[in-house]
Amino acid sequence: MFHKGLVSLQLSFTFAIVFAVVALGCVSARAEAPPVSLQLIDMQGKPIPNAVILAGGQPPAVAVDRNRDMLPAIMDQIDKAFAPKVLVIEQGRRVNFPNSDNIRHHVYSFSQPKTFELKLYAKQPEHPIEFEQAGIVVLGCNIHDQMLGFIVVSDTSLWAQTDDNGQATLAAQDGVRIWHPELASGFSQMEHHSLPPHPAGQPITLQLRLKPPLATPEKRGFGSDRFRNHGR
C-alpha cells in the first residue's frame, strides 16, 4: 500500500514538472515574439520619423528596479532647444538635464506622470530626475517658450523609434501602441493599432493621421495652459 502511494506521488510530481515546463515554454514562446518591420506614413503617404512604438505589457517590478540603477539618460539643452526633442526611457529610469547653452534655463513639466521644476540654472542640476510612472511627459522652459520637448516613459522594454524613413523593427505580435507629437488625437495620448495578418518577414505599413506641427507660442509665462492641459 505504501509502495503504491509512493509511486502515485512520484507520478504526480513528474506530471507537475512536465506541466510546468510546457507552461513555461508557452510563456517563453509568447514573450519571444518574432521581429516585425514597421513603416509609419501620414495620410499623404509621407514617412513619419521620430515616432515611438511600444509592444508588450507592463514589466515586473524587478525591471523597474534595474532601470533605476542604470546610469541616467540625458536630455540636454542646446541652442535653446531640448536635445533630443523626444527621449524614450523605461519606467524607473533617471534623467539628467544638463544645460549646454551659455545662458540659464528653467525646465519644468506639469504632466501627470511627472511634475517637476528645475529653476534657473546653468550647466548641470544637482540631481537627476526619476520617472517612476509610465506616460508622456511634456517639457517646457519658463524663459524660452519656444522650447518644447518630450519624454516617453515606457512600461515595456519592447520599444523602438522610427528613423528618417519612418521605419522601425521590434518584437510584436497582435498590436502596438504608437506615439508622435503631431498625432491628431493629441500629443499626450498613445494610439493602439492592430497588426494585420502578414507573411513572416514582410514589412507592415501603418497610416497615421497627423495634425500640423505645433507653432512657436507667444510668451505666456510659467505654467502656461499648453503644459497644464497636456500629458494627463
Image (tube, rainbow, N blue to C red):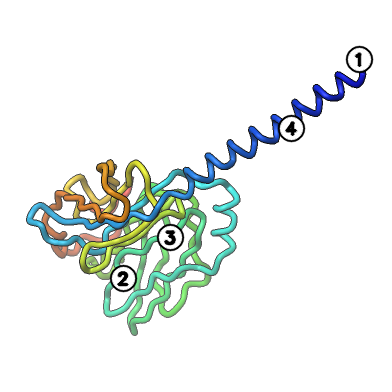
- Examine the image and state in which quarter residue 65 appears: bottom right
* Amino acid type of the residue that numbered disc 4 sits on in the rendered structure: Thr
Asked whether disc 1 touches disc 2, contact meaning CB atoms under 8 Å apart, the reply is no
Give the crowd class for mark 1: few <14, some 14-19, many >=20 residues within 10 Å: few
Seen from the viewer's position, the closer of residues 210 and 19 is: 19
Q: Earlier in the sequence, mark 2 or mark 4?
A: 4
> Residue at label 1?
1
Q: Nearer the viewer, mark 1 or mark 3?
A: 1
Q: Nearer the viewer, mark 2 or mark 3?
A: 3
> Which quarter of the image is occupied by the C terminus?
top left
Q: Nearer the viewer, mark 2 or mark 4?
A: 4
Give the crowd class for mark 3: few <14, some 14-19, many >=20 residues within 10 Å: many
- Examine the image and state in which quarter residue 170 appears: bottom left
> Residue at label 4?
14
> Does residue 156 show up?
yes
What is the tally of numbered marks visible in this picture? 4
Q: Earlier in the sequence, mark 1 or mark 3?
A: 1
Label for residue 192? Answer: none
Picture coordinates of residue 126, whole percent (x, y):
52, 72
| Real-space CA distance between mark 2 and mark 4, rounded to the nearest whole angstrom | 58 Å
Q: Earlier in the sequence, mark 3 or mark 4?
A: 4
Tell me if residue 103 comes above or below residue 7 in the rendering. Answer: below
Picture coordinates of residue 94, whole percent (x, y):
50, 62
The residue most toward the right is 2
- Examine the image and state in which quarter residue 19 appears: top right
> Residue at label 2?
82
Identity of the residue drawn at 66% across and 35% down: 18
* Amino acid type of the residue that numbered disc 1 sits on in the rendered structure: Met
The residue most toward the top is 1
* Amino acid type of the residue that numbered disc 3 sits on in the rendered structure: Ile
> Residue at label 3?
89
Which secondary structure, mark 4?
helix
